[in-house]
Amino acid sequence: EKGGEWERALIFFRSVWIATLSPTLVTYSATISALEKCGFWQGALSLLAQMLAGRVTPDVTSYNALISACEKGGEWQRALHLFQLCRSELQPNLVSYNAMISACQKGWQWQQALKIFNSIPEAKLRPNLVTYSAVISSLEKSRALW
């Protein structure tokens, strides 16, 4: 995953299926994370569908990787849908919020980014440097629209 060798991650994941082993949350999440690193959001969402079909419940880490994959692919609306799913099923962490704000920033959705930023205290989380940087970048992009 760290080296960006997502093809190898997919081959490994498929070998788990061929060996008749049931993929686990860890194998799904690791593969989704590898796909996220290269922005292959379609593959990441496909794995989410397989994950749910296999009755493996995604965790916050899985959702974070999925949101980031959509962010890298410029799919802020898909990222928002995943973020909302995560909020309805789990307790998103600051990584979730930061990834979603970044997705909005890349999609020129500064108002949505600000809305998500303003909801962080409700989740009993504290913004960090990454959070502030993403919000500032989003607002900076909004100036280009004026």
Image: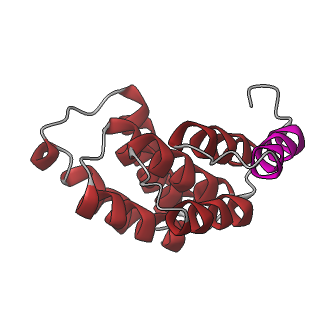
Please provide percent x and percent y for residue 9. Answer: 80, 40
Place of residue 76 in the rendered image (x, y in percent of width and height, measured from the top left) = 53, 67
Q: Is residue 7 covered in magenta?
A: yes
Residue 82 image-quadrant placement: bottom left
Q: Is residue 97 magenta?
A: no
Residue under the image location 57 percent in, 62 percent down: 48
Query: Taking 111 as reference, is 28 left or right?
Result: right
Residue drawn at the location 54% of the way across and 69% of the way down:
53
Q: Which residues are magenta?
A: 6-18
Q: Is residue 81 above or below residue 59?
A: below
Who's the residue at 82% across and 26% down the image? 3
Is residue 44 shown left or right of residue 145?
A: right
For residue 2, which quarter of the picture?
top right
Name the spot of residue 32 as percent of width and height, x first.
64, 48
- Describe residue 12's horizontal placement relative to residue 137 as left or right: right
Q: Which one is in front, 137 or 120?
A: 120
The quarter of the image holding the N terminus is top right
Q: Position of residue 133 (x, y in %)?
A: 44, 36
